[in-house]
Image (cartoon, helix red, strand yellow):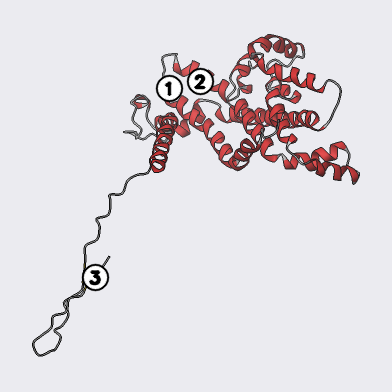
Amino acid sequence: MTVRTDAVQQPDGKRAPEAPLTPEPGPTPAPRRISGRSLGRLLTWLGLGVTTVIFIYPLLWLVSASLKPRSEVFDNRLVPATFAPENYLNVWQDAPLALWLGNTVLVTALAATAVTLSSAMVAYGFACYSFPFKRVLFGILMATMMLPGAVTMVPTFLIWNGLGQVGTLTPLWAGNLFGSAFYIFLLRQFFLGLPRDLFEAARIDGANNWRQFTSIALPLCRPALAVAFIFEFQASWTDLMRPLIYLRDESTFTIPRGLKAVLDQYGFSGNWHWETIVTASVITTIPMIILFFAGQRHFVAGIATTGNRG
């Protein structure tokens, strides 16, 4: 950009004051355009926002319905016209929800802990030791994942019935003491990524196999253990099929089985106490949300680092 400074010469030889400096007009800046990268990022965030709304809408509707009186549960308003917070007090009187919550916490904690530890031990053996027919046995283990649950449902029931455990909480968690093919595969992939020098050094220092497993392998694979624990906790917390098969007495019901009983009692008998059902559903959903956010860091780390070795 150039600047013009024109001075005028007067007749007496003196210079007149210079005119104010006026910059010459430069080129007009081109209109700012959105690059392809920015447009792609905008579309990505837009798609994520729409997907988030779609997935979170049922939960928002459930919470909203739990705060409405019985006549307004299905009016499809996210903001209730009439607030009924007393639903969260009445639900404890309409159903033994505290007892069902206690049973569910007991079953899910035992099931998640049992399957996590047992699967970790089996996975450690497949990852860190050599023995005859290792690949064949691992292939058979993976093949069990292809069996539908309906195939083993009747034989498993006959086993527990022969042991006299039908009607108790034992069949809901004790089967996890034998591990799970999915979690064994997941944890094996994580164990394969651990540096072998650590185990060699521990062996030189006199640590036996069990000490190496508990002091080195388990602490290092904490993210993968968190993934297995959270997955199984969620599966046991929401499991309805096994409680329907094995539980008979209302005092042993878990949350899904109890909600099924409440639905049978209030939903289709003409009473239509839907506010009780949706309120109980919200109460039973809250622990899973808290568990996920509490273990989110380990959960994401386990998902990101598992499976990097074959």
Number of numbered discs = 3
State which quadrant residue 274 falls in.
top left
Q: CA distance from mark 2 to mark 1?
A: 9 Å
Q: Secondary structure at mark 2?
A: helix
- The nearer-to-camera label among 1 and 3 is 3
**Among all residues in the image, which is located at the extreme left?**
11
**Relative vertical location of residue 10 with respect to residue 103 in this rendering, above or below:** below
At horizontal 62% and vertical 18% (from top left) the residue drawn is 243
Which residue is identified by label 1? 273
State which quadrant residue 151 falls in.
top right
Q: Tell me if label 2 and label 3 are in contact, CB under 8 Å.
A: no
Which residue is identified by label 3? 3
Q: Position of residue 85 (x, y in %)?
A: 41, 36
- The nearer-to-camera label among 2 and 3 is 3
Q: Tell me if label 1 and label 3 are in contact, CB under 8 Å.
A: no
At horizontal 74% and vertical 35% (from top left) the residue drawn is 191
Callout 3 amino acid: Val
Q: Position of residue 96 (x, y in %)?
A: 56, 26
Q: Position of residue 254 (x, y in %)?
A: 60, 24
Q: Tell me if label 2 and label 1 are in contact, CB under 8 Å.
A: yes
Left or right relative to 65: residue 251: right
Q: Please rate how many residues cluster around mark 2, counting C-alpha atoms within 10 Å: few if below 14, some from 14 to 19, many from 20.
A: some
State which quadrant residue 295 falls in.
top right
Q: Nearer the viewer, residue 3 or 167?
A: 3
Q: Which of disc 3 and disc 2 is earlier in sequence?
A: 3
